[in-house]
Every structure is written in structure tokens, then in C-alpha cells.
Amino acid sequence: MEELVIRDAEVVDGSGDPSYRADVVVDGGRIVSIVQEAAAAGCQRPRARRELDAEGLVLSPGFIDMHAHSDLALLRDPDHSAKAAQGVTLEVIGQDGLSYAPVDDRTLAEVRRAITGWNGSGDDIDFDWRTVGEYLDRLDRGIAVNAAYLIPQGTVRALVVGWEDRKATPDELERMRRLVAEGMEQGAVGMSSGLTYTPGMYAEDAELTELCRVVASYGGYYCPHHRSYGAGALEAYEEMVALTREAGCALHLAHATMNFGVNKGRAPQLLSLLDGALASGADISLDTYPYTPGCTTLVALLPSWASEGGPEAVLARLADDESAERIRHHMEVIGADGCHGVPVEWETIEISGVSEPGLGDYVGRTVQQSADARGEAPWVTARRLLLADRLGSTILQHVGHEENVRTIMRHRVHTGGSDGILQGEKPHSRAYGTFPHYLGRYVRESGVLSLEECVAHLTGRPAARLRLPDRGLVREGHRADLVLFDPETVAAGSTFEEPRTLPTGIPHVLIDGRFVIEDGRRTDVLAGRAIRRTA
């Protein structure tokens, strides 16, 4: 007898097709049968050792977070309810060009310092890997949810070229190509870049194109955080489309927003650009989070020249009055490339987390508010914080536009991604709320998407981008990565005031047929594994 039958569920299968009522039978980690309208038709109903009454609940595939920053959280926190409770059964990590493989001892230490604000210091982690394959093997020991990995181009460049702003030599480029090939062979699904972060931003398009050719030869995709989301955003999108067309590589645009005042109401221009490329044969997808504020580190706003040489060089420049004044001028007057070419507006920069506990007074306030309280200029406050927190501060950047968010999420190649940084006292609420927020606010409350459309955006479509033949749909033979939620009550519990509050209306989440969330509570099951690229 099979293990589980989910009885009388309203199945939204991830394809975008209309929902239907069915009994769904799970055994051996897979969906073994789907019996539609069994009771109404008078059919023999399937039986199993356990029955779950799903009356009033929607059964969908598990949600796929196409842009996650859980690279260390998956190892540090076996509970990981931040994602499991949302119905996330797979995260794509290695984002924005910076993560922890492939590395050597030097690069690992540098990367750990550079992205402390994203993932913490890692002092509580045993970094017993150096290659992509070894990192995926570490995940295979058991994690809360599944994870796929993107080779971080910035980390590769740091390993081969260093943190200097210069062109790679032919030998260095060839070594980077080999590292990307090795990472793909070891199971990565593609490559990411952070083209407003050092050292990835120092790569010219020709270098990126050569690396994308390698990714394409393995059937992977390129996921860039491109060179601007502010001034020059459309040009930056055009650059990525042209680059990947030249390389013959699939393109997935990370957190594809149009932010800052210069881009208010300009989302249709972005979608027109993408529609034209799609019509001419380009393979493009994108992800967004359903919120207006962005989230990054405070140091990321600095001009690229100030970040050359790595974290210690940044701190030295900040400590030097003359260099610090040059940084201020670029940020406040010219518009630093780290701030997307837009002069920084300190009233929009809210400190969401710090690494040093004694700096907690900054958290939850904008830089402008903290400066006003101290009777000083905001750059003085920001500089002091950067030095005192040794670049570990995270921020919310209140520069988005609701009409752009809604317009982009309707697009036919859209998928969902949280871009969730789990560090800090007040992380962005998207880390704990993205997927129920889509279902609650943008389906039930505002009708921006139908339920079937939204589920397809969060399940079937991202699974297709990842080329996963047996995930993302409720189909016989597919993996039993499943979510049961109440369409009338599902909602994000997280707010900007209480960002770590778990969602409501998601009583059950299964990975490989095992309950990760049961009756609204996290079980002790660690069913997640590394999801490797398939040939």
C-alpha cells in the first residue's frame, strides 16, 4: 500500500491550466497517481497508509526561489523556516557573482569578508570545501530545502585575477573558463554575476561573453545582477541581452526591477525590449520580488574605484580623509556606479542590520535620521558606520515603484525570487514573506495574477528554466515536492516592522514526499539536497 493519499485537494498543477479536484497519491518520494473527481464520479478511491484531508486547500508544486542568499543559512540553520514555512522547496543560490565556491584559502577569506552582510561571517561554519562539487556534497548531507547552485563569476575572477580593476590576461581568461567548466561539470546550473559589485564589475563584456559560451555548452544559463538598475538601467538590460545572444547562452535577469526616480513608470519599456528579443529567438526569463524596497549592503553603494583591492583596501580608503571626501563626492554629487549612477538619497537608505552588536542604534533608521539625531552630515554617519562595522552593515533601499513591480510580474517569462538576505536585526520582509505575499496580496486581494498564473510563475516556469524534468508540476512520476495552502487565508506574516514573522495559511509542505511543514509546524525532517545540473 502507498504511503500517503492527499484527499480532495484543489490541484493547481503549475502549468497555468485551470485547477481541478483530485486525490493525489504519494509513494517513494514521487507522485504515483492522480485521481480526478473520484468521489463525484463514483470511482474506487485510492487508499494509502496515511490519508490527509485537503478539503478547502490548494495543492501545488513546491515553490522555487530563483534568487536566494541562503548559501550559509542552509548549513547554519537546520530549521530554515524562513523559506520552508513559505512553501519553498528549492532555492537557487550562488547569486550576484559572490559565493563560497570555487575558492582557495585566500579567496575564501576575502569573499567571507566581502559578503558578511549577506550571509554572516561564517565563523560558525566548517568550510570543509573548496570546489563547487565539494560544496554541493556538503549540502547533500542534509538541508531543510533543496538547493541549486550558480557559479559566482566574481568569486572566479577573485580567484584568478584578484580584486584589481584590470583586464584579464589571455592565460587568466582561459583559467576562468576552465573553472566555470569544472563547476558546470560538478553540477552547477549556470553562472551569476554581480556587475555593481567588486570584483565582478571589472569584467569587460568580452570576458563575460567567453564565460557564457562555456555555460551555454553545458546547457546552463547566465544570471546577471547587471550594471545598473537606476540611471542607464535600460542600457544595462540591453547589454545583457546582446551579450548572451552573442554567446548563445540562455539569460535569466535577476531581480529585474526598474528603480529610482528616473525609472518611475518605465517598466513597459523594459518589457518591450524583452519582447523584441524573445520574438527574435532569445531565451530569456527573469525574476522579481513583490515589494518596492531593495536590499543590499551599505558598502555596495560606494563607487567601484573605492572597492578595488578588496575589503581591507576599502577600509583604508574610508579611514583616509582625502579618499573619503572623493567617495562622498562621487556618491552625493556625481552618482556612484555602486548606487546605479544615481546620487545617493540618504533618506531612502535604511540600516537593516549590523555585524557589531554595539551598533544596534542604527538599525531601523535611515542614514539621514541617524545623522539628524547626531547633528551631522549623513556621509559622516555612513562613513563612521562602515568603519565601525567593518563593512558588515545591510540596508533597505526605498527606491522602487509599485506600478513597475505589478507590470513586470505579469510578464510571460516572469518567475519569483525573494532575494532574501537573512542577516541583520531587521532584514527585508521579502526573506520571510515573498511567496505567500504573491498569493495573498497579488492574487487574492488585488487580482494582478490569477491563482493558476501565479503558481505557474512560482513553480512550473522556474523548473523549466532550471531544466528539471521531474519538478515544478503536479504530474504522475514527478517528485513529491508539494505545498498545501488555504487560498482564502494565505498571507505573509512578515512586515518591515516584524520581518521574521512566519506566514499564515500554509499548513503543509512536502519535499520528496516527506513533511517538512506539518499542521503549520516545522518538523525535524531534512529532506533537502543539492539539485545538480542534468545532462
Image: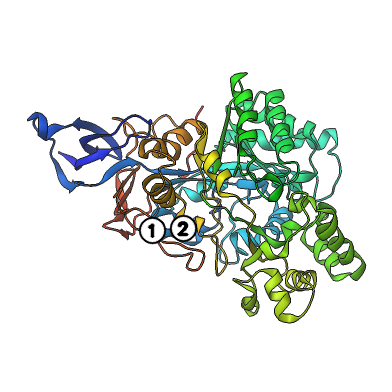
Name the residue rendered at 66%, 66% in the picture: 393
Res 250 → quadrant:
top right
Dot 2 or dot 1: first in sequence order is: 2
Residue 415 in the image: state x and y as whole percent. Answer: 50, 39
Instruction: Out of 492 and 531, give the one closest to the viewer.
Output: 492
Q: Circle 2 is placed at which residue position?
A: 432
**Amino acid marked by disc 1:** Pro
Residue ID at (60%, 41%)? 256
Q: Tell me the number on the disc at residue 271.
A: none
Can residue 245 be seen in the rendering of this structure? yes
Residue depicted at x 71% and y 32%: 238
Q: Position of residue 418 (x, y in %)?
A: 52, 50
Labelled pair 2, 1 in contact (Cβ < 8 Å):
yes
In front here: 123 or 213? 213
Answer with left or right where residue 426 lies relative to residue 469. Answer: right
Residue 17 sits in quarter: top left
Q: Which residue is mark 1?
A: 503
Question: Could you tell me residue 195's position as x and y percent?
Answer: 73, 44
Q: Is residue 50 left or right of residue 267?
A: left
Local crowd size for mark 2, using a 10 Å CA cut-off: few (<14), some (14–19), many (≥20): many
